[in-house]
């Protein structure tokens, strides 16, 4: 299925949840990551259950420390 991930087209397998999406895009450090689907933040507790649907827009935000 086709979705947008950080404003780029991405093809994902059917029944992909947010946890699997983060694995697919090689996001290994999920402790400092936030995920929004269609501009709505999805709590980490729901990542395993939230199945991504065709045409959705997903934003993955990673916190970065610096000075």
Image (spheres, grey):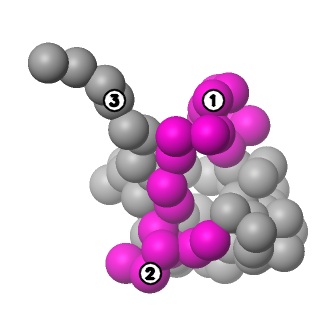
Q: Of residues 15 and 2, which is closer to you in this image? A: 15
- Image quadrant in which the N terminus is located: bottom right
Give the number of the disc on residue 40. Answer: 2
65 relative position to 34: left or right: left
The residue positioned farthest toward the left in the image shown: 67
Residue name at image x 62 percent, y 71 percent: 43
Q: Position of residue 27 (x, y in %)?
A: 61, 32
Q: Secondary structure at mark 3?
A: loop
Q: Are marks 2 and 1 in contact (CB under 8 Å)?
A: no
Q: CA distance from mark 2 to mark 3?
A: 21 Å
Q: Position of residue 12 (x, y in %)?
A: 70, 54
**Mark 2 or mark 3, earlier in chain:** 2
Look at the image and say whether residue 31 sits in the magenta stretch: yes
Does 46 appear above or below 1? below
Location of residue 29 by image quarter: top right
Does 49 appear above or below 62? below
Does 25 appear above or below 67? below
Q: Which residue is mark 3?
A: 64
Q: Position of residue 51 (x, y in %)?
A: 77, 74
Q: Point out the stretch of residues depicted in magenta.
A: 22-43
Residue name at image x 84 percent, y 74 percent: 49
Q: Secondary structure at mark 2?
A: strand
Instruction: Judge the density around disc 3: few (<14), some (14-19), many (≥20) Cα neighbours within 10 Å.
Output: few
- Image quadrant in which the C terminus is located: top left
């Amino acid at each position: 299925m086709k979705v947008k991930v950080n404003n780029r087209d991405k093809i994902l397998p059917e029944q992909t949840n947010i946890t699997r999406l983060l694995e697919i895009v090689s996001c290994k450090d999920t402790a400092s990551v936030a995920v929004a689907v269609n501009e709505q933040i999805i709590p980490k507790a729901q990542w395993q259950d939230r199945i991504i649907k065709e045409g959705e827009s997903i934003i993955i935000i990673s916190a970065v420390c610096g000075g």
